[in-house]
Image (cartoon, helix red, strand yellow):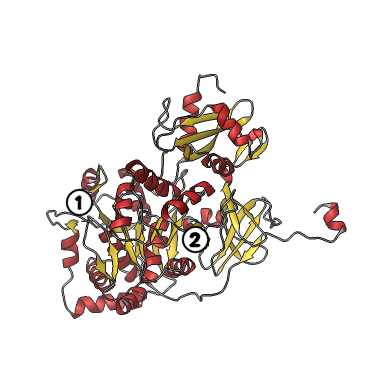
């Protein structure tokens, strides 16, 4: 505190916000929810996957997941067992996830970017007893992976002592003891009281605090960790998200987010189920054309995704002169959202109620969600969700005053159970503070305003330190995204002998635009930011050896560590640094 503050007795308000306690938290399981929605909306379309399967109603979804649950039990799956799935956004994925949760088993959602070795590592680590897998994903054939895993099961390799069977989600195969088609698998349980009784007994063992899934973190660096989330975590987060955006059974939501990611599983699927809405999965893997067509043909009222997905859909439409229908609602998140993109979305979709989301897998995932366009023209702001508490702390764990940056910490019902078999990493991020409350340290730098709203300035580890000055990529990206020729930017730090790090900007041009001179970019930045934040290096996608697209994770986040490597490679030996 300054002497002036002390003299006048003024104590700055701390960066601390407690969410509302209404609506009340729900004590549901997935079985409870599906049964209830089947009774309330029996003929309402629950899931539609244009081009890959027929839509199904809430009654059909309830019946089919019960039948699949019986099949899982008949194949030896019981409460607490792990079931893996590796596939795109298809109807069978939804059925497997829900059926597994209904019987108290744990669904292990595998990242669709995983290589065969990464799939094997994840299966071994989590001890999966059963794997559901697709034959192909986009242009990638998974048959070599399937053959390798099948051979390991047949030879009973000790590497996979728990894995007993593989189920192919599409097509047919010669049925064997350890490899069968999805159709054959679902037909397996005998019709009768025995199968039904076993299913009912399993479902009664499930309560809201039962772990329902292992969700691998989607960090762009380091080994992923398996986050353990419960029915209580997931269903309440989905319920509260839908309440915030006013979701109703009259809504049809387009969800290109991958279902293996917490955004797809919770924000997309679970939120829709909790409110009796219709969920559209436009394509197995993200395709801007399929997403745009689904928005039109399915008469969607909302769209969800990361900023790169929204931008890709807009770019596809601009190139073809396609006009998208107006939308009532939507959710955008997963990485910082620039005010420039928000204005474009508002204009293109006539969209007023786009929720700007913040969260992480470990918080089920959302802790903040705006009710609409919360922007002051320079930054986007988000409001805390109910039953959630947030504070911003310094490096010593002390809550900082309003308006000062620090690490965002979150507490409440939404915190993960922990990282599976990793108490050390769990303890690093989940800590009991002096107030006796368990807090999740997000690793994100944030600023809170006097209303308790938050804006994220970036990952703490992404902060660029140039000559001792902290520079936050997000504010430079927001500035660059305002430029009329730039559709998206990504700013990273590149190692430099003189300054330690310098700012490098990777720019994606709008359709029909040409690269600007670096001097022009410098002038543009300095209109709003200090000279030390001007990029020392400017790279345009698809120009001078720069890849034509941003490297991304399977969930659509830009992989900045890859951009750092690309930038370093391109300037090596050029004398630019």
Residue highlighted by disc 2 = 366
Q: Name the residue nearer the viewer: 415 or 189.
A: 415
Percent from the top left, x then y, of residue 262?
42, 57
Percent from the top left, x then y, of residue 148?
23, 45
Disc marking residue 328: none
**Label 2 environment density (alpha carbons within 10 Å; few <14, some 14–19, many ≥20):** many
Extreme right residue here? 7
Residue highlighted by disc 1 = 154
Number of marks in the rendered image? 2
Which part of the image, by quadrant, shows the C terminus?
top right
* Residue 80 against residue 393 in the figure, above or below: below
Question: In which image quadrant can residue 92 be found?
Answer: bottom left
* Residue 106 against residue 288 in the figure, above or below: below
Percent from the top left, x then y, of residue 317?
35, 46
Residue drawn at 21 percent across, 62 percent down: 54
Q: Nearer the viewer, mark 2 or mark 1?
A: 2
Q: Secondary structure at mark 1?
A: helix
N-term-proximal mark, 2 vs 1: 1
Residue 556 seen in the current view: no
Q: Name the residue nearer the viewer: 167 or 481.
A: 481
Side of 218 relative to 497 (left or right): left
**Label 1 environment density (alpha carbons within 10 Å; few <14, some 14–19, many ≥20):** few
Question: In which image quadrant can residue 552 be found?
Answer: top left
Q: Secondary structure at mark 2?
A: strand
């Amino acid at each position: 505190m300054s002497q002036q503050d002390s003299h006048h007795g003024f104590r700055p308000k701390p960066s601390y916000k407690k969410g509302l306690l209404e609506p009340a938290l729900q004590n549901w399981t997935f079985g409870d929810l599906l049964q209830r929605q089947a009774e309330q909306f029996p003929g309402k379309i629950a899931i539609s996957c244009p081009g890959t399967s027929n839509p199904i109603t809430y009654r059909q979804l309830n019946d089919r997941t019960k039948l699949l649950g019986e099949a899982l039990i008949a194949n030896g799956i019981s409460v607490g067992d792990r079931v893996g799935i590796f596939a795109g956004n298809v109807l069978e994925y939804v059925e497997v996830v829900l059926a597994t949760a209904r019987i108290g088993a744990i669904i292990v959602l595998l990242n669709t970017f995983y290589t065969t070795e990464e799939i094997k590592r994840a299966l071994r680590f989590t001890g999966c007893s059963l794997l559901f897998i697709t034959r192909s994903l986009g242009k990638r054939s998974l048959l070599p992976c399937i053959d390798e895993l099948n051979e390991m099961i047949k030879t009973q390799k000790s590497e996979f002592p728990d894995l007993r069977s593989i189920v192919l989600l599409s097509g047919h195969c010669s049925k064997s003891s350890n490899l069968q088609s999805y159709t054959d698998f679902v037909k397996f349980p005998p019709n009768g009281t025995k199968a039904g009784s076993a299913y009912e007994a399993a479902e009664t063992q499930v309560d809201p605090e039962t772990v329902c899934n292992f969700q691998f973190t989607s960090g762009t660096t380091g080994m992923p960790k398996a986050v353990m989330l419960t029915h209580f975590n997931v269903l309440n987060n989905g319920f509260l998200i839908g309440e915030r955006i006013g979701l109703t059974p009259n809504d049809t939501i387009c969800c290109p987010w991958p279902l293996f990611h917490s955004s797809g599983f919770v924000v997309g699927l679970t939120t829709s189920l909790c409110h009796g809405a219709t969920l559209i999965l436009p394509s197995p893997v993200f395709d801007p054309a399929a997403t745009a067509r689904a928005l039109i043909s399915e008469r969607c009222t909302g769209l969800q995704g990361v900023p790169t997905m929204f931008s890709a859909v807009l770019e596809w439409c601009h190139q073809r002169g396609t006009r998208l229908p107006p939308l009532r609602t939507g959710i955008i998140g997963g990485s910082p959202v620039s005010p420039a993109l928000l204005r474009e979305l508002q204009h293109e979709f006539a969209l007023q109620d786009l929720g700007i989301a913040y969260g992480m897998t470990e918080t089920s995932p959302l802790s903040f969600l705006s009710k609409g366009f919360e922007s002051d023209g320079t930054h986007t702001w988000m409001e805390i969700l109910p039953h959630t508490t947030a504070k911003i702390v310094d490096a010593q764990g002390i809550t900082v005053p309003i308006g000062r940056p620090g690490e965002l910490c979150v507490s409440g019902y939404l915190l993960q159970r922990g990282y599976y078999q990793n108490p050390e990493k769990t303890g690093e991020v989940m800590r009991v503070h002096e107030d006796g409350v368990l807090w999740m340290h997000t690793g994100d730098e944030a600023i809170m305003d006097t209303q308790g709203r938050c804006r994220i300035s970036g990952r703490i580890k992404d902060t660029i330190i140039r000559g001792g000055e902290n520079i936050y990529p997000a504010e430079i990206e927001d500035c660059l995204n305002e430029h009329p020729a730039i559709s998206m930017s990504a700013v990273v730090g590149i190692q430099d002998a003189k300054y330690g790090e310098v700012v490098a900007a990777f720019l994606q041009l709008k359709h029909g635009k040409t690269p600007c001179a670096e001097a022009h970019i410098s002038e543009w930045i300095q209109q709003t930011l200090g000279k030390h934040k001007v990029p020392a290096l400017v790279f345009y996608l698809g120009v001078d050896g720069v890849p034509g697209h941003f490297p991304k994770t399977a969930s659509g986040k830009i992989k900045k560590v890859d951009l750092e490597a690309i930038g370093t490679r391109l300037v090596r030996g050029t004398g630019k640094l």
